[in-house]
Image: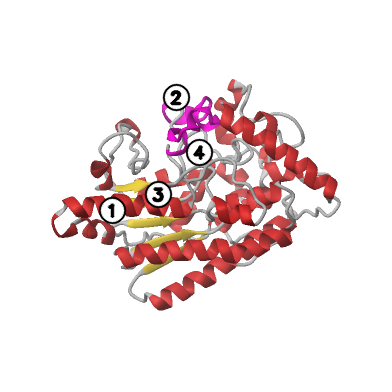
Amino acid sequence: MAKTSLVLFLVLSSFFIALLQCDARTHRSRTQPRPLRPQPEPQRCKYDGIFQFGDSISDTGNQILEPAGPRSPCAHNPYGQKLIGEPTGRCSNGRLMIDFIAQALGLPTPKPYLELGLPTPNPYLEPGEPAVSFNHGVNFAVAGSTALNTSVLLQNGILSPVTNSSLLVQLDWFLAHYQNLCETAKNCETYNILKGSLFMVGETGGNDYNYAFLQGKSIEDATALVPLVVNNIRDVAKKLIDLGATRLVVPGNFPIGCSPMYLTLFKNNDSTSYDDKGCLKGLNTFARYHNQYLQNALQQLRLEYPNVAIVYADYYQAAEWVLTNAPQLGFETKSILKVCCGTGGDYNFSLMSMCLGWKEFCMFRSDQYINWDGVHLTEKAYQSMADWLIKSQVFECIV
């Protein structure tokens, strides 16, 4: 284990140098997830905006606007190629789930992507007058961020090497901006914006565990972090509710055992076992543990705030559904667990060269791949997950 930990730590160090340079309800190991049954079109709320918190799963441009951001791979080609032909800060080849969710909810378009119909809230760090973008929500998510503050992670022997803009820092941004508007708006009229908006609290927490595993921590070590991570998510949701938020969606974690990154790094681990999809059982069991712990915390929050809609978004099952139904969705069967923008090994993945020296064929074939760079998914995969969530009535109007 010591040898494995050393190798993982060395790989982690190389990865983040490169980065700065350029729950399913029940796990079905032998049966497929039930196909999504046709359902009547859900009633739609009229949302005034979306406030997004989280990491690279939903960051639309904040991380590349931080001091070290321009050296992030997500700030360079081929990221964003399918969107507008150039990087936007999204860690994918195109749009993210938040783009498709916002579009499905019919929000107005604050950014100059009119021809693409992108009604996504502006990144908080984007230059310009923040009060304007705040009218339809703000995206506070930062790629590489964690649910726990970097100081808390360090106390647990874990480095957060990409950004200090953790979930609590993002909350501080929200509070500062909200208070600034309240000082200038008569009777704090922004309260109505909060009451009529959708708050996406995550996905977050995934990087806390990623950094732990990549720095040689065991599943037992990571499990000890779960209460801390979930309590931070719950506390942020509670503070938003106390300010006036009435509609919150809190996503769970992905089936990380299906990630090409982990499949590559843990390939020669003697303790590794695989499910019938070729995913790592232990890591997926851990992800489901986090998700169940989070759902229990959200249920307690619902009891405390019975008049607030607090919805759990099952990112695990959505991703699992995509993996199971990949051929029917148009993904190449032989490439389900392989990387589009990568090179080397069984999964076409290397931490040392994520999208470095990318080939044009990846751009032309990206819709056949679920995985973009081994850590993040392609636009088509995110769209498929968003469609699953929307059809599952996660965003049904219940308030």
Q: Which of the marked residues, 1 or 4, is nearer the chain's N terminus?
A: 1
Local crowd at mark 1 within 10 Å, few (<14), some, or many (≥20)? Answer: some
Q: Which of the marked residues, 1 or 2, is nearer the chain's N terminus?
A: 2
The answer for how far apart the CA atoms under marks 1 and 2 are is: 34 Å
Q: Name which residue type carries label 3.
A: Ile
| Magenta highlight on residue 79 | yes
Local crowd at mark 2 within 10 Å, few (<14), some, or many (≥20)? Answer: few
Q: Residue lying furthest left in this view?
A: 186
The answer for how far apart the CA atoms under marks 1 and 4 are is: 32 Å
Which mark, residue 101?
3
Q: Are marks 3 and 1 in contact (CB under 8 Å)?
A: no
Percent of width and height locating residue 213: 70, 50
Which residue bears the numbered disc 1? 178
Q: Quadrant of the image for the C terminus?
A: bottom left
In the image, residue 162 sits, relative to residue 178, either above or below, namely: above
Local crowd at mark 4 within 10 Å, few (<14), some, or many (≥20)? Answer: many
User: Is disc 4 placed on a helix, strand or loop?
Assistant: helix
Q: Are marks 4 and 2 in contact (CB under 8 Å)?
A: no
User: Is disc 1 placed on a helix, strand or loop?
Assistant: helix
Q: Name which residue type carries label 1.
A: Tyr
Q: Which residues are magenta?
A: 62-84
The answer for how far apart the CA atoms under marks 3 and 2 are is: 22 Å
Which mark, residue 85?
2
Percent of width and height locating residue 316: 58, 57
Which residue bears the numbered disc 4? 379
Q: Name which residue type carries label 4.
A: Glu
